[in-house]
Image (tube, rainbow, N blue to C red):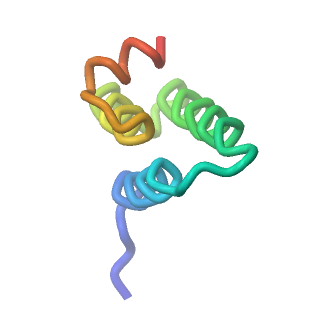
Amino acid sequence: MTEIPLFQRLERAVTLIARHPYYPGKQDALDDCLEDLEERFRSGSLTHDQKTTLVALLYNDDPLAGARRAH
């Protein structure tokens, strides 16, 4: 079985979270996801470009807007 690279798995997970309909606690899930992405970036598991892409997907906007929010 072929292993899916970490970034692709994160991309799928972030997209599922972002597209999920609103429910009480969704903002907490978004905040937790953003915190996890930031920790992965700091530990070297994600590049700046990868983090920017994932944050943009998380908030459904352009990468530059997402990057501004992440800092």
Q: Measured from the top left, where is residue 58 in percent x and y?
A: 44, 40
Which quadrant holds the N terminus?
bottom left
Above or below for 42 versus 11: above
The answer to whether 20 appears left or right of 59 in the picture is right
The answer to whether 22 appears left or right of 2 in the picture is right
Q: Quadrant of residue 21?
A: bottom right
Q: Residue at x 54, y 27 (%)?
A: 38
The answer to whether 71 appears left or right of 27 in the picture is left
> Number of labelled discs?
0
Q: Measured from the top left, where is residue 69 in percent x and y?
A: 45, 16
Q: Residue furthest bottom?
A: 1
Q: Residue at x 67, y 51 (%)?
A: 23
Q: Nearer the viewer, residue 27 or 56?
A: 27
Q: Measured from the top left, where is residue 36 in percent x and y?
A: 60, 37
Above or below for 56 versus 13: above
Q: Residue at x 46, y 39 (%)?
A: 45
Q: Nearer the viewer, residue 51 or 61?
A: 61
Q: Measured from the top left, where is residue 9 in percent x and y?
A: 42, 61
Q: Residue at x 74, y 44 (%)?
A: 25
Above or below for 3 versus 54: below
